[in-house]
Amino acid sequence: MNFLTFFLQAAEAAPVQQKGGGLSFILMLVLIFVVMWFFMIRPQQKKQKEMNKFRDSLKKGDKVVTVGGIYGTVNEVKGPRVSLDIDKNVTITVDKASLVKDYSDAQQNA
């Protein structure tokens, strides 16, 4: 018995499937999308809103960390740029988008 006859016999013996079931397939796709939105997209949007709120509320004296890991104190906020004092007589200018968190709360709790 070769493979071709085996598959032909298996195909003849297979039960005939009923047509339809399109509605259940669509419902399953919608359910998958809702679950993905609830567990993946929604939390990311919430986190992005918090970061935007943090960046918009920056003021002089806030202690921040950049994406590159530079700790500094906000000296001046001017549009999309922020001047940071990172050491005595050392000031750098960074983009607001590169600031990730305020570490002053973490230092007070430690």
Image: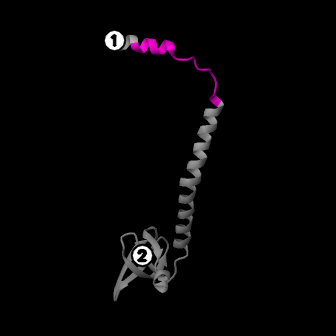
Mark in the foreground, 2 or 1? 1
Q: Residue at x 42, y 15 (%)?
A: 7
Magenta stretch, residue numbers: 6-22
99 lies left or right of 43 = left
**Which SS class for mark 1?**
loop
Residue type at mark 1 is: Asn
User: Which is nearer the eye, 48 or 32?
Assistant: 32
For the residues bearing labels 2 and 1, Cβ distance under 8 angstroms: no
Q: Is residue 61 visible?
A: no
Q: Residue at x 46, y 15 (%)?
A: 10
Q: Is residue 49 above or below residue 70?
A: above
Q: Is residue 85 above or below residue 27?
A: below
Quadrant where the image shows the N terminus: top left
Task: Answer with mark 2 or mark 1, whichever residue precedes in sequence.
Answer: 1
Residue type at mark 2 is: Val
Among the 4 quarters of the image, the one containing residue 50: bottom right
